[in-house]
Amino acid sequence: MKRIASILFLLCFVNQINAQDLYEDALTAASYAYSHSKKAHGANNVFHTQEYADKAIEAFEKVEALADKCGCDDANETAYEAKTKMVSSMDQDTYERSRYYAKQAKELGPKLLEQLTNCQANNGSDSYSEDIADVSEEEEAIAAASEEVAQKQKELEAQRRQLEIEQQKLQEQIAAQQKAQAEFEAQRAAELKQQTAVKAKAEQALQKLESALQELSIAFDDNSTFETQKDYVRSENDLMNETLDDTKSFYVNRAKELTKSAMQQFAGYTEN
């Protein structure tokens, strides 16, 4: 008899342990559901709201099943109601509507935890309830710390994006400066090419003009010597520091000087 009693006692003890495990699992799942619900309600966009809502649904489903096994009918109904609210949150396409249902589900979290705790207490688990309360506090602390870390990460991400924007602006400014420099160099190269062409044609024309004036001077006087000027012959380096208009002006002035010199020399022939 003693052996049978011992076996029965052990069976009851094992059943009690198994029951306590169910309560523990139910309360832990409810804590996670409540934590995810708060994050869903506190998110700042529909994506994150529904991301945490999805996690909360999974936790509420687990609570619903465990509460049914524990015989906690009130907690089972509350878990079902909270899960339904979160499903509605997932079905919304706007942040405000999604957050509205997430809030309703979140507000059921404390009620669900209280119902599970009372259910456990009614089955002789006062000490276990205290342990769960401690776990819940730790979960809350961990959740708060996680939210703080997430906020810091958001701030760092915002700073990184701002830095990328500033770098992009700087790169655009450098690209614009390089483009302007390339355009300037291209324009200068084209202008220098024109200057070189003007130089070649103008110097050739001035040489021909000098030759014609020499022949004309000899026609007037066989012993005449026409004073030539070669200061119009220049190197291409001389063109580097002047514009196309400057180059044209130079050869125009040399042509005027050459013509003026010839007119002065020819004026002596008419006086004789």
Image (spheres, helix red, strand yellow):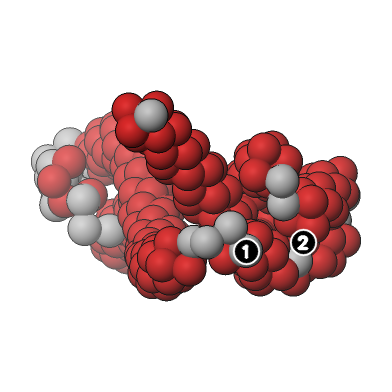
* Residue furthest to the front: 1
**In the rendered image, which residue does mark 2 sit on?**
105
Foreground mark, 2 or 1?
Answer: 1
Label 2 packing within 10 angstroms: few (<14), some (14-19), many (20+): many
Question: For the residue labelled by badge 1, is the local secondary structure a helix, a strand or a loop?
Answer: loop
Q: Front-most of 104 and 29?
A: 29
**In the rendered image, which residue does mark 1 sit on?**
122
Q: Front-most of 93 and 185?
A: 93
Query: How far across and down, in percent of the image, does residue 49 sit?
Result: 68, 56
* Residue 223 visible to an observer of this rendering: yes
Number of numbered tags placed on the structure image: 2
- Report whether 261 appears left or right of 48: left
The CA distance from mark 2 to mark 1 is 26 Å
- CB under 8 Å between callouts 2 and 1? no
Query: How far across and down, in percent of the image, does residue 169 sit?
Result: 43, 60
Q: Front-most of 9 and 237?
A: 9
Q: Amino acid at mark 2?
A: Ala
Residue at 71% x, 69% y is 111
Q: Amino acid at mark 1?
A: Asn
- Report whether 134 appears left or right of 116: left
Residue at 86% x, 44% y is 91
